Amino acid sequence: MAKVYLTTPVSAEEISKLKAGDQVYISGVIYTARDAAHKRLVELVEQCKELPFDIKDQLIYFVGPTPAKPGKVIGSAGPTTSYRMDKYSPTLLDLGLRGMIGKGGRSQEVKDSMIKNKAVYMAAVGGAGALIAKRIKKAEVIAYEDLGPEAIRKLEVENFPVIVINDVHGNDLYLQGAEKYRKY
Amino acid sequence: MREIHIDRIVDAVSKMVQTANFDLGGDVENAFKQALNKEESPTGRDVLNQLLENVEIARTERVPICQDTGFAVFIVELGQDVHIVGGNLNDAINEGVRRGYKEGYLRKSIVGHPLERKNTGDNTPAIIHIELVEGDQLKIHMSAKGGGSENMSFLKMLKPSDGVEGVKDFIIECVKTAGPNPCPPIVVGVGIGGTFEKAAYLAKKSLFREIGKRSKLPEIAELEEELLEKINKLGIGPQGMGGRTTALDVHIEIYPAHIASLPVAVNINCHAGRHKEVIL
Ligand code: SF4
């Protein structure tokens, strides 16, 4: 369990060094998208249209924040459950998406796609939205404003805390962690 | 007949939906602290520490504990000697939700049609269960129920011959299937008996109970303890990353059943157990 500091964008080579269980602190730009935004992104890909941001070597954070109070950058901003994005993630990984941040397990198809494309899946602590928001320094809606909390935001983060769940070597912290502490 | 004006209800509801989201109940916070003492996994302890820090930030800065500020679910105990004046109870509660979610900068997470999925923009309608009780008081219990944990809920019509062992197996299986998705440590709400919808309602209702409070029925209290111990041996741990603290509590409510049925419903709450109650 190492402590790693990452700055985005992240190369395939850098991402391959991460291991399941590593504590990672991310700085730089990350993009938000959840259910409805993923649906639209994948529709664009199917129609061979350009995405609203260059996805190569970037990280997507599955989140729908609460509205920012006056004078604040963002509201509460913890991760949402990731399996709902499983249907869409392989398409984005094929385009060079380097990592995803959410919470909860992923499908085998997504795991296989991460190994193939050299990408990782990391978890932020679900339900720690007030704490996580403090690591977000800037937030700007860059697409799908009509989706409200589900719009795509460009976030500038500093030491954003996550834990690696699936690395490019096929390890899975959810399976291995639970196995280690299982007594029943 | 005691009269209660709807303005008081609107006001109380709009305040309680906000405090529920900013100020986590002491029972949950205590449960985190107790879990921290017992947690063997370093990652698990790290997660619990983050949760405690998060609760503190939310409380002092009045920001939501979690960005999913939930479906507003109400259990209302309406005294039969109460006369609501100025409008109707359901509208008053919905108006309170509308105001509270706006004033508190809470997230609006409700779509008006389950298939067309357009956001209603004000987090209404709320889910409102009204129970008629004796007396002249109006007791409003509110829970901000997140989608992540609600999605990890299950109901099964067991056979009477499956018995208590069948019930236990089903509950454990539900927790395993849910794994990291409902943000463990969780509270497991269980409804046993009644009909299909009654069991589901009991499971939800059990989640309104304070953490650490046991059922008044000795055999059910024992079952709660046994299940809690078993669940915490599963190893799922905080956020599902491995560890001892998978559940903070198990709450079970029961009801008489038909000779042919043994319904069991499991409704999971995440660690963000945001509940408030007010008496008018
Ligand atoms: S399951 Fe609970 S803590 Fe987790 S994201 Fe949903 S509401 Fe928040």
Image (cartoon, grey):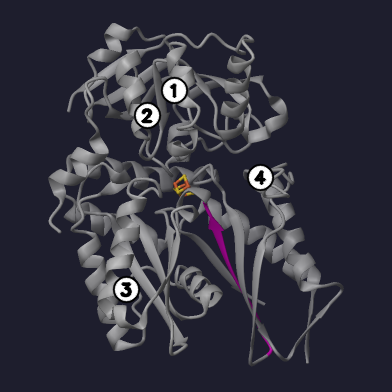
Q: Please, what secondary structure does the residue beneath circle 3 have? A: helix
Asked if marks 1 and 2 touch (Cβ < 8 Å), the reply is yes
The magenta-colored residue range is B136-146
Residue at numbered disc 4: B108
Asked whether residue B2 is in view, the answer is yes
Judge by depth and name the residue closer to the eye, B60 or A21: A21
Q: Please, what secondary structure does the residue beneath circle 2 have? A: helix
Residue at numbered disc 3: B167
Asked if marks 4 and 1 touch (Cβ < 8 Å), the reply is no
Foreground: disc 4 or disc 1: 1
Q: Position of residue A152 (x, y in %)?
A: 60, 23
* Predominant SS of the magenta segment: strand
Judge by depth and name the residue closer to the eye, A58 or B35: A58
Q: CA distance from mark 3 to mark 1?
A: 38 Å
Q: Is residue A133 left or right of residue B229?
A: right
Foreground: disc 4 or disc 3: 3
Answer with mark 4 or mark 3, whichever residue precedes in sequence: 4
Residue type of the residue flagged with mark 2: Glu
